[in-house]
Image (tube, grey):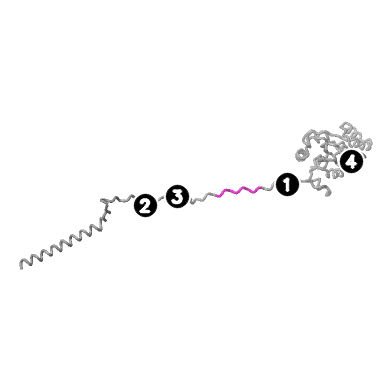
Amino acid sequence: MRVIQKAKVNRASRKLMGFYRSAYDFRPPFTVVLDAGVIAAAQTRGIELKTEIPKLLGGRARLVVTRYTVKELRKRGKEAKPCVAFAERLKYVSVEARGAATSAEAAVALVERGNPQKLCVCTEDFELQKQLAKLHGVPIVRLMWHGGREQFLVAPPLERKAADPEVAPRVELDAPPPTAAPKAPPLPSRTKQRRKGPKQPNPLSMRKKAKKEGGRRPADASAPASRSGAARRKRRRSGAAAGAQSAEAQTS
């Protein structure tokens, strides 16, 4: 269980170092400044700094100290001899600021002017962490109790701002506004749409007209025929009646 928690912490710390890589151009090997307090704590608790810090940062790391760190460790007496021996084997980094009396003040002097050397600071001093939190582009590697054991982690920038109300607010990248889900296209209606265009001619108007015979209109087959027949029958009856009258006149 502890191994899983440690892996999660290391993964989160590497993600934060990815932020410093993109925002402040940090590149491995990372240079990590150690103060006297974290060296003493690591020696007392059996923590291998040269092994744990590279795993935490996700790349090669170069551990450095200042001469003020070694002086502070020597002042702790015989119990700090292993710490002094460890610090003396590390590379020294020069401090341009004058009057730095402690390792914490020397660490602040190294990074207070924009951190041009791209340094990380490893400390367990809470007061030093508050001072470093006021500076931009300074990764803080701190030793804290997490998951039932002490381990290193990289302090998130937002967490640093909340630790001290006097810290200047950092510019945070605004998250892109949530995009609305695309609307589904409307379903096509089942009603058959009429095609727009020129109308077709009336099929009744396209019937062929009957041809005229002899230049005359064709007579109606029913009405004229019936009329001519009735006239002939009437003439016949009138003719027959007239003949009968003439015959009677002759006999008389």
* Residue 13 left/right relative to 64: left
Quarter occupied by residue 78: top right
Label 2 or label 4, whichever lies nearer to me, is 2
Q: Which residue matches tag 3?
A: 198
- Residue depicted at 57% across the width and 48% down the height: 185
* Residue 106 left/right relative to 9: right
Amino acid found under the numbered disc labelled 2: Ser
Q: CA distance from mark 3 to mark 2?
A: 17 Å
Q: CA distance from mark 1 to mark 2?
A: 74 Å
Label 1 or label 4, whichever lies nearer to me, is 1
Q: Quick one: SS at disc 1? A: loop
The reply to whether discs 3 and 4 touch (Cβ–Cβ < 8 Å) is no
Q: Residue 25, how many percent across, how many down?
A: 78, 37
Q: CA distance from mark 3 to mark 4?
A: 92 Å
Going from N to C along the chain, the mark reached first, 3 or 4, is: 4
Quarter occupied by residue 235: bottom left
Q: Which residue matches tag 2?
A: 205
Amino acid found under the numbered disc labelled 3: Pro
- Residue depicted at 24% across the width and 58% down the height: 224
- Residue depicted at 78% across the width and 39% down the height: 24
Q: Write down the region rendered in magenta.
A: 179-186
Going from N to C along the chain, the mark reached first, 3 or 1, is: 1
